[in-house]
Image (cartoon, helix red, strand yellow):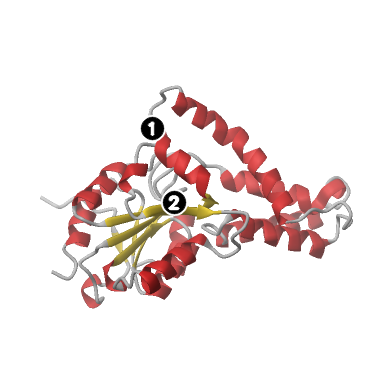
Amino acid sequence: MMAEPSSIEFLCDLSELPRGPIRHALFDHDGTISTLRRGWEESMEQIMIESILGSCADTAGPEAVKQVRDEVLAYIDRSTGVQTLTQMQELARLVRRFGFVESSQATDALGYKRRYKQLLMRRVGRRIENLQRGGDPNEYRVRGAVEFLQGLHAGDVRLYLTSGTDRDDVVNEATLLGYANLFDGGIFGASDEVMRESKELLLEKLMNELQINPAELVFFGDGPIEIGLCRRFGGLAVGIASEETCGGLSPSKRRRLVTAGAHIIIPDFAEGPALLERLLSCGR
């Protein structure tokens, strides 16, 4: 009997990597284990295009509008995983560069962030209210994620949750989704005061202050930012290419994760036990 094909895609021979055993696991939040904020790309696209075109949205002409949309979509794709304030700083630069909006009518990155968050929360807020009323958390979790986290935790792996979303929101959402308590290494997120990327700051802390061995580190994420950072710091990079709306593998996510240098790609954690066994046995 032929074995069922596995959804775990190894993009390198792990036996050739100086690995483990894995002792520290970092997880991006949105799109990696949580789908509460699915659709954020559409909200960001809307805010960016509206902010760049301003009152010229109806008079700019189809070619100009297409140019703006193409540039916005390309930026969103490559900046997935970056903290929101950084994305809004880029939006402020695009507003100035395209020049449709007078400087007196433009705002700064924090102002654009507030607009974006207000629009996004119209969608996310309804989901949060559903959870607060007793809705099923599995509706907003990537398949198999909680069981996988529990398996790592039981295997004495220290877990860290990090996000480009503001930290207070990450803590609240992880609590509602029922896994905040598993992240004994801490929960980290962005703020309006800290300009550097929260994921980079966390990795620097682990390497410099705690002096962990990068061969004992794995980072799970759905964006090129965390994959690139993990490769830079010497950890094992696992890309989550989940099609959040209907399940299965997202070809566009897979493409950007391959480009970013992921060692492993999975659509979700449905085959978590097999991956868990492989990670916990690394170096043994």
User: Toward which corner of the image does residue 248 lie, by quadrant?
Assistant: top left
Q: Nearer the viewer, residue 122 or 171?
A: 171
List the residue tagged with mark 2.
Answer: 250
Mark 2: secondary structure: loop
In the rendered image, the residue lying farthest to the top is 133
Query: In x, y percent, where is residue 211?
Result: 33, 73
Q: Nearer the viewer, residue 219 or 208?
A: 208
Query: In x, y percent, where is residue 103?
Result: 87, 58
Nearer to us of marks 1 and 2 is 1
Query: In x, y percent, where is residue 61?
Result: 85, 52
* Residue drawn at point x = 81 percent, y = 62 percent: 96
Q: Which of pointers 1 and 2 lies earlier in the amino acid sequence?
A: 1
- The total of numbered circles placed on residues is 2
* Residue drawn at point x = 36 percent, y = 51 percent: 267
Q: CA distance from mark 1 to mark 2?
A: 22 Å
Name the mark on residue 96. none
Q: Residues within 10 Å of mark 1 (few under 14, many from 20)?
A: some
Name the mark on residue 137. 1
> Which residue type carries mark 1?
Pro
Q: Is residue 170 above or below residue 19?
A: above
Determine if residue 111 is in view: yes
In the rendered image, which quarter contains the C terminus? bottom left
* Residue drawn at point x = 71 percent, y = 56 percent: 109
Q: Is residue 121 left or right of residue 253?
A: right
* Residue drawn at point x = 50 percent, y = 60 percent: 198
Q: Nearer the viewer, residue 260 or 231?
A: 231
Q: Residues within 10 Å of mark 2 (few under 14, many from 20)?
A: some
In the rendered image, the residue lying farthest to the left is 1
Q: Is residue 11 above or below residue 254?
A: below
User: Toward which corner of the image does residue 122 lie, by quadrant?
Assistant: top right
